[in-house]
Image: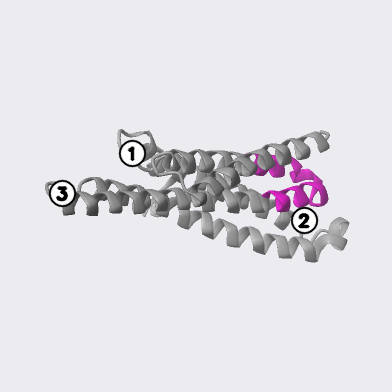
Amino acid sequence: MLTNKSVTEFLAETASNQPVPGGGSVAAMCGALAASLGAMVANLTIGRKKYADVEETMRRIAGEFDKARSKFEEYINLDALAYAHVMEAYRMPKETPEELQARNNAIAEATFHAAEVPMTVALEAARIMSLIERVALEGNRNAVTDACVAMMNARTAVLGAVLNTRINLVNLPETDEIADMNHRCQLLVQQAIEQEQQLLSAITI
């Protein structure tokens, strides 16, 4: 389990000549960092008299960030597992027509799943961006830069996860479902970039 490793171990494995953890897991890690920083800003707001009017909102948002972080932690591992399944499919025998067909089917199925995992990461990262904006604008002013870094990490999670989705989709036959996923990817990237710039433009330090 990648999430059971220390930060140093995770970084060393990422830097090694092994394919996992790769960009997909790192994108999910960016999502986890975004959620963690967002929760921190919310928690630094809770209990402060100056922000009493948003305390209940911050408690709810902190809970949302905690749930998101748990999901991202799961996706870090699932992305690596999805890649392993693709490699297993490519190692299947292909000596007979039946074996070749079974192998092709397994590759297509594993590859589609390998696209679905980062797509889920992108969707979850996009979802918490509005929460990050909320804590940045309404939360503890002393932690506003932390909220901005959270937003930057969320944007990276979206863009990175979308790239990993697309690299898998390009190897699959064009279908309505694939076309729809590619279109959603395009919208997610546009939305993430716009939301990040909107927040950064609104923050004056």
Q: Is residue 47 magenta?
A: no
Q: Please identify the residue farthest to the left as the structure is shown.
A: 95
The quadrant holding residue 20 is: top left
| Crowding at mark 3 (Cα within 10 Å: few <14, some 14-19, many 20+) | few
Identify the amino acid type marked 3.
Pro
- Image point (23%, 54%), residue name: 102
Q: Are marks 3 and 2 in contact (CB under 8 Å)?
A: no
Label 2 sits on residue? 45
Mark 1 residue element: loop
The quadrant the N terminus occupies is bottom left
Identify the amino acid type marked 1.
Pro
Of tags 3 and 2, the one toward the viewer is 3
The quadrant the C terminus occupies is top right
Distance of mark 3 from mark 2, alpha carbons?
58 Å
Left or right of 129 on screen, residue 12: left
Of tags 3 and 1, the one toward the viewer is 3
Q: Nearer the viewer, residue 54 or 179?
A: 179
- Across and down, in percent, residue 131 comes to 72, 53
Magenta highlight range: 129-152
Sooner in the amino-acid sequence: mark 3 or mark 2: 2
Distance of mark 3 from mark 1, alpha carbons?
22 Å
User: Does residue 23 sit above or below 47 in this rendering?
Assistant: above
**Overall secondary structure of the magenta section:** helix
The label number, if any, that marks residue 19 in the structure image: 1
